[in-house]
Image: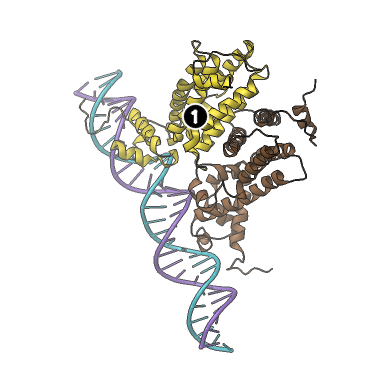
Chain colours: A brown, B yellow, C cyan, D purple
DNA sequence: AATTTTATGTTAACATTGTTAACATTTAAA
DNA sequence: TTTAAATGTTAACAATGTTAACATAAAATT
């Protein structure tokens, strides 16, 4: 417990913790080595004993960030206890809420700036990290059970994802004053999705009242 | 024509030209003052006689960028010579192609990094620069004429735009290998739009064969 | 237990960045 | 012709990521 003056004990973990705390409030582009050294009471070059470069720390953040993101989304899509339509709704809602609650992390994960790093450590399409494969699997499940229109599932996954990504970006990059109506917006977006990718409006016993209203519009 | 050695003549315009040339090939984040001074054969601080800061140059780029962008999109939506459905299709196609052909400019205009600058010079919602108001007007036109479902036109505009923005971002931020199918993707996305925002599939004499196929599916 | 090696820290220096101050020269105005 | 304004240069700043040379604590080896 008692830390000696010179060796810190667990600097690497602490650097990461401080970095994640930082991007809760500010963009990664403002995360400097000085911020990290000041917060740990070390020198500006101490980080080089734990990461080969600043980018290596960013890389670790991206890796852990996708872990967190994937864990928030994928289980919702895989939960066989719930109706498919409910899973779609909840995962879409969670996606957008994740972006809104962690805008700087979301941009770090899906933005262009660190794309070169991201692409060396993960494959968004194939792995669990992004929820992409889980979404695609859910779509295919729906197609098999006849709820969803039979079409290219990869393309459909991309289009759903691009809607989520687009709305998330609009919300967090703040070039429109739409935060006050964000709930309405993604409910409406979700309704659009159902309209487009369901073969026909099947009677689904959804556990979410809102969904039933959408599928069986009140007369 | 003959330029003296000391005074350059038209440095301000030349700086802007070089900057725009630069982002045809590289991201704004790599556009340094050294790049600009080297390209003009001036010193690194010469730019300060024409712009109060680097951000002021970026600001000018954003302003001109939106001018270019708006000029590419708005006229397509306003062209009363064409059917509404064709205008939607062409403007959506043009939007995505603009992003793909000018990815660095697109990110400069719509990204977060320079949002603070953008928001001091333009209002995306109210002006012509982004095509937003033209899109909203077109939607309202469609609602009046009965082609489009009557609903909150602002929200519908946001949702259409978020789809365009989302797909554009996915295409240009390159975290998926989907460039090879980008035409299919936005055709499909456009079909989705029609499915969702048309009240019913009305017989529209579109001048684009593809559109007619979508609206009157081949039996 | 003593010595050596490894891990982990520091300080000092680099080049690159945007920026400013002090100075120089050319053009325009008085 | 003289003065003022516009537009250029050079030299220096602090902040950035990074590296080299050095220092110290902990672990491994003898």
Which residue shows up at 68% across the image and 41% down it?
Answer: A141
Q: Quadrant of the N terminus of chain B?
A: top left
Which residue shows up at 57% across the image and 48% down it?
Answer: A126
The answer to whether residue A175 of the structure is visible from this angle is: no
Which residue shows up at 70% across the image and 28% down it?
Answer: A200
Q: Where is mark 1, residue-wise?
A: B96
The answer to whether residue A11 of the structure is visible from this angle is: yes
The front one of B61 and B110 is B110
Question: How far across and down, in percent of the image, does residue B20 sit?
Answer: 38, 32
Chain identity of mark 1: B
Question: How far across and down, in percent of the image, does residue A18 sit?
Answer: 61, 53
Q: Quadrant of the C terminus of chain B?
A: top right
User: Across the whole image, how many numbered discs are drawn on residues?
Assistant: 1
Asked where in the image residue B205 lies, by quadrant, the reply is top right
Q: Is residue B144 left or right of residue A214?
A: left
A121, above or below B55, in the image: below
Asked where in the image residue A80 lies, by quadrant, the reply is top right
* Circle 1 SS class: helix
Question: How far across and down, in percent of the image, does residue B76 sit?
Answer: 48, 18
Question: Callout 1: 10 Å neighbours few (<14), some, many (20+)?
Answer: many
Which residue shows up at 55% across the image and 57% down it?
Answer: A37
């Amino acid at each position: 417990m008692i830390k000696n003056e010179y060796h810190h004990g667990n600097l690497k973990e602490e650097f990461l913790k401080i970095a994640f705390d930082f991007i809760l409030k500010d963009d990664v582009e403002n995360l400097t080595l000085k911020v990290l050294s000041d917060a740990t009471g070390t020198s500006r070059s101490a980080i080089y004993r734990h990461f080969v470069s600043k980018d290596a720390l960013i890389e670790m953040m991206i890796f852990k960030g996708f872990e967190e993101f994937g864990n928030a989304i994928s289980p919702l899509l895989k939960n066989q206890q719930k109706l498919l339509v409910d899973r779609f709704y909840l995962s879409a809602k969670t996606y957008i809420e994740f972006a809104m609650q962690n805008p700087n992390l979301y941009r770090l994960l899906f933005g262009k700036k660190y794309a070169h790093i991201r692409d060396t450590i993960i494959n968004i399409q194939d792995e669990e990290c992004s929820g992409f494969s889980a979404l695609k699997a859910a779509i295919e499940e729906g197609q098999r059970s006849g709820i969803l229109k039979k079409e290219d599932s990869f393309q459909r996954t991309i289009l759903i994802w691009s809607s989520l990504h687009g709305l998330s970006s609009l919300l967090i990059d703040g070039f429109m004053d739409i935060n006050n109506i964000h709930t309405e917006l993604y409910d409406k977006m979700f309704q659009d999705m159902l309209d487009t990718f369901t073969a026909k409006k099947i009677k689904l016993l959804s556990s979410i009242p809102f969904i039933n209203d959408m599928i069986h519009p009140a007369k």
